[in-house]
Image (cartoon, rainbow, N blue to C red):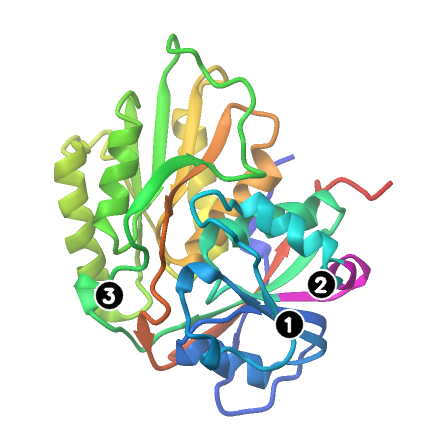
Amino acid sequence: MKIDYNIFYREEMPLNKKWNYHADIFISAFNLSERVNFVFNKLRADNKRWIVHQEYSIDPVLLPSNNCFICNCGSKNDYREDDFCHEIISHEIGTLLLSAENICIDITGFIKPYMMTLISWLVSKGKKKIDVLFSEPKVYAKKANTTFAGEFNEIRPVAGYYGIGHSTGTEEETLVIGAGYDDALISGVAENKNTATRKIQIFGFPSLRADMYQENVLRATRAAVAAEFNYTSREDPFQFFAPANDPFATASVLQHIFKKYNNPKDSWYLCPVSTKSQALGFILFYLNECQGKPVSIIYPFGKTHEAKTSDGVARIWKYTLEFPGAPRVR
């Protein structure tokens, strides 16, 4: 069954008006960005919970005083996204999520692998619809020099997104990168998968803001040169574009890429180091169309993350993710 992602629902939420929206449970990951706190205060829900990622290294005096779940990460080098999910499952939040009809998650402050694994877990439990919020910044704090994570210590598949039957070297490998600002992450992933026959980048265009596209391409071009991407051929440019704020367009582009290049025996590695909205497109496409195939989502896992990378709130989007093929709870 081919899914038409163009009919999926997204809505721009007004900044200065009351929202006609209510969730059973609302979860947001706390950091020091204005846009994260703005949404938490504005949205109405029966239950609201903060998640705190210790990789942000936020001073405890700055953390919320109520409804705050601090991940018990222990050693940061040993803590994984599936450990985080197991904590959530055994916590009150897990019970609230499983019993809720209307789940809403603000992914703006989430570190991507945690976001990915949490959504994968919810889908595995039979959740076929999840509302997701994302707030666009007015500006990234350091423009083209903005970094979101510190030095990464490993590149591996994200829990919940492991492919089955990856090639042993006799078939082709394709790497698809959702290209964001961080050229060190892009080039690191590309070099890690240097056996890939194809290295494809998906750029965010239109970008979140007019000047961000130029900044994005500037950083990604540095990575392309370092990692020997090939987009000189007009027949196979290995460059694709999807709006930076539209996960459904991104999922459609991934559909097109797979149709254009896929051989059932080939191995595919997807890596969304772009905006979280585009990362949602990778998640949506994978969970609906790639499970049980030689396709994995990989990610460069960082030791630390920046607690504040942007200023202001430009726009707020609500995306309704649907997973028609999700397993039913037994």
> In the rendered image, which residue does mark 3 sit on?
212
Give the mark nearest the N terminus, 1 or 3: 1
* CB contact under 8 Å: marks 1 and 2: yes
Q: Secondary structure at mark 3?
A: helix
**In the image shown, does 153 or 59 lie closer to the viewer?**
59
Residue plotted at (26% across, 60% down): 147
Q: Quadrant of the N terminus?
A: top right
Q: Nearer the viewer, residue 32 or 201?
A: 32
Q: CA–CA distance between discs 1 and 3?
A: 31 Å
Determine which residue is flagged by label 2: 93
Residues at marks 3 and 2, CA–CA distance in whole angstroms: 36 Å
Circle 2 crowding by C-alpha within 10 Å: few under 14, some 14–19, many from 20:
many
Q: Disc 1 vs disc 3: which is toward the camera?
A: 1
Amino acid, disc 3:
Met
Would you say the residues marked 1 and 3 are in contact, meaning their CB atoms lie under 8 Å apart?
A: no
Q: Amino acid at mark 1?
A: Arg
Q: Which mark sits nearer the N-terminus, 3 or 2? A: 2
The mark nearer the N terminus, 1 or 2, is 1
Q: Which residues are magenta?
A: 95-104
127 shown above or below 20: above
Q: Is residue 323 visible?
A: no
**96 falls in the magenta region:** yes
Kindly give the residue lying farthest to the right in the view shown.
Answer: 330
Dividing the picture into quadrants, the one containing residue 268 is top left
The secondary element bearing badge 1 is classed as strand
